[in-house]
Amino acid sequence: MARLSRAFLFLLAAGCATPTEQSASGVDRMYVINCGENHVKDVSRWTPGVNVGQPHVFANHCYLIKHAKGWMLWDTGNADRIAALPGGFTNPQGTITAFMRKPLAESLKEVGVTPADIKHFAMSHAHGDHSGNANYFTAATLYVQRAEYSAMFGAEAQKFGFIAANYEKLRANPAMILDGDHDVFGDGTVTIKAAPGHTPGHQVLVVRLPKTGPVMLSGDMVHLQYSWTYRVVPSFNFDIPRSMATIDAMKAYARETGAQLWVNHDMEQNAKLPKAPAFVQ
Ligand SMILES: [Zn+2]
């Protein structure tokens, strides 16, 4: 039954996009893909001073954008290989257990996309829960801030909390090395915005959906809606003052443009969004 309804949704999705509609709107649709879960023992590492000692489950998502000029993927979630581990993967410190309920490769396949179809690729930052499947996307142009690129491929990637093996194949990708904001398709519909602090070259993505309007995809600028409202960042951020300045700048941008913030790791907020193979427009 579940299989049938999924197939039905896909047919519906496939049926309503004509080439004319696509070229008229630039961005045709966006798929929000479940890309894992991260179970933590003490959420107060992410919300210093609040909920000390409380366990928490963070959601994790990838976002697939269908633009008239090609497919774009934002973030890659937990590594697909974790899906084979029934108990998930626990970090050496024992503080986080990562799960991957359905491999990203499978989720893409359900909407008729292969990794080689992705021509535009960006990650909010290179931490393992965002770069887990980055090595699939060698056919894409990589959009990355210069500070992140240097940290990722420098001698001390580990110092930034990065696992270089997750993304080592991207070294050979065509890359747009950015020093700030970038209009990906040149039509204002998909904009990368520099949002440093969590990592040296963290970035967020603003997608102007044809019906929903502008949506800002948070990456790890904030981890919860609570953190956005109250300006709360993790104690382990690369640069806490810059993280706060980024939140203030993005709040101002969101006010000016009317953009909604979709918080990648917020389980409660994401429960309200349709997930792939359904999509948002
Ligand atoms: Zn994260």
Image: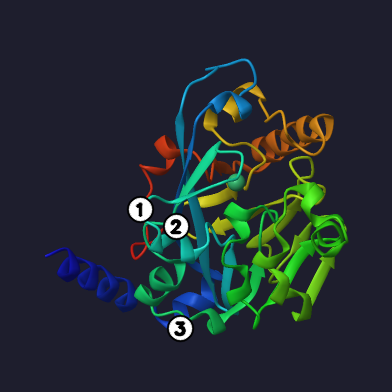
For mark 2, does the 10 Å Cα neighbourhood hold few (<14), some (14 to 19), or many (20 or more) residues? many
Of the two numbered discs 1 and 3 on the same chain, state the one appearing first in sequence. 3
Q: In this figure, which residue is indicated by the disc labeled 1?
A: 274
In the rendered image, the quadrant that contains the N terminus is bottom left
Residue 15 in sight: yes
Q: In this figure, which residue is indicated by the disc labeled 3?
A: 19
**On screen, 54 above or below 88?**
above
Q: In this figure, which residue is indicated by the disc labeled 2?
A: 32
Q: Is residue 274 left or right of residue 141?
A: left
- Cα separation, mark 1 vs mark 2, equals 7 Å
Q: Which amino acid, by three-letter code, is at mark 3? A: Pro
Q: Which amino acid, by three-letter code, is at mark 2? A: Val
**On screen, 175 above or below 280?**
below
Q: Quadrant of residue 46?
A: top right
In this view, the residue in front, 48 or 3, is: 48
At x 65%, y 54%, the residue is 205
